[in-house]
Amino acid sequence: MKQTVERSSEQTTEIAEVQKVKTASQEVRYNINTGSLQAETGKGTGTTRQTRKEYTAARDQNFRNPRQRAVIWGSLAVIWIAVVWLTGRLLPAGSTLTSLMDRNLAPTWAHPFGTDWLGRDMFMRTLKGLATSIQVGLLAACGGGLIALLLGLTAASSKAADRVISWIIDLFLSVPHLVSLVMLAFVFGGGLAGVAAAIALTHWPNLARIVRAEMIQLKSAEYIQVSHKLGQSRLQVAMQHMLPHLVPQLFVGILLIFPHAILHEAAITFLGLGLSPQQPAIGIILSESMRYLSAGMWWLAFFPGLALLLVVRAFDVLGNSLKTLTGTGSSREVR
């Protein structure tokens, strides 16, 4: 009996030891699995963070891409200019009529830009004035670009013509810009056509110098020399081979002339040598508002001037964006 009890106690002790060993092995396995799981989780978190960093870097790099940024800002500038011009052109004629009951009103919801001394809504007058300024700028910029193109092509035809046109360009650049603009506007008698012609005749020299330099560079190109040897005339070479190469530079130059044309139209109209008082123009609005600023009617000059600044800046942004997209270089900016 005693032996049986001792054997059972020994078996119980062995069973307890085996259970302890199993429990210890299970704990070791649990710890190992837990550690591997933590390592894998940490690895996955690191990979996720790295992926996020790469995505953020790629997004920032795309945003810093000058071509994509040029497309975005150029599109916004085109939309803004189109909205201003179309709104000013489509406004009814009765939107700027006088209303003596609404004279000298400060900006309100009914009149965002206030009213003038005759009760005319300044918001409507500003939109019509901006549309007129854009029209003058378009005529002047296209006229100046055409003059620059013709003189640049002529300068590349022969050395004698190059010397004559270079002298003319230097002559126009030596005269103060505003002085020649005022003189030509006075000669042409003012008005929309006279102001556009005066601005066109004073804004071509820098663009003509760029076109001339491009033409001289193209004359030494191999395909131009081959075209001459194949029997093509100078006019054919200029129209078929040189002119397509000049289109991006010419278009950018015309766009960069735009803001200067608009500002100079407002300047000579402000001096009384531009558009007639019956035509809505920003220069006329600013000139008339000078007499009422001392009376505290600040809105007569502030809002039209701010609107003119935004339109001019939009043309500048559009020209710079197109310059970036066409790769014409920052050293070829037309002023």
Image: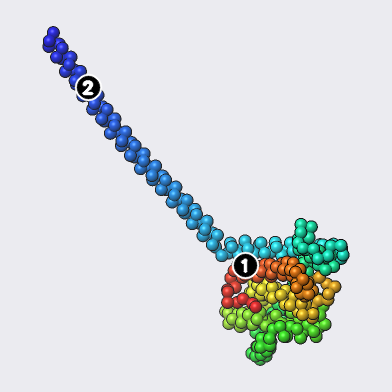
Nearest the viewer among 264 and 144 is 264
The disc, 2 or 1, on the residue closer to the chain's N-terminal end is 2
- According to the picture, the residue beneath numbered tag 1 turns out to be 321
> Which residue is painted at 77% across and 67% down in the image?
126
Left or right: residue 93 compared with residue 323: right
> Which residue is painted at 67% across and 83% down in the image?
205
> Which residue is painted at 52% across and 58% down in the image?
60
Query: Which residue extends farthest left?
Result: 3
- Residue 57 against residue 199 in the figure, above or below: above
Quadrant assignment, res 166: bottom right
Residue 322 image offset from top left, x and y in percent: 63, 68
Residue 45 image offset from top left, x and y in percent: 42, 45
Query: Which residue extends farthest front?
Result: 295
> Which residue is painted at 30% across and 37% down in the image?
32
Residue 49 image offset from top left, x and y in percent: 44, 49
As measured in the structure, the alpha-carbon distance from the residue carrying label 2 to the one carrying label 1 is 84 Å
- Residue 125 against residue 166 in the figure, above or below: above
Mark 1 and mark 2 in contact (Cβ < 8 Å)?
no
Amino acid, disc 1: Ser
Query: Which residue extends farthest top?
Result: 1
Quadrant assignment, res 179: bottom right
- According to the picture, the residue beneath numbered tag 2 turns out to be 16
Residue 108 image offset from top left, x and y in percent: 76, 59
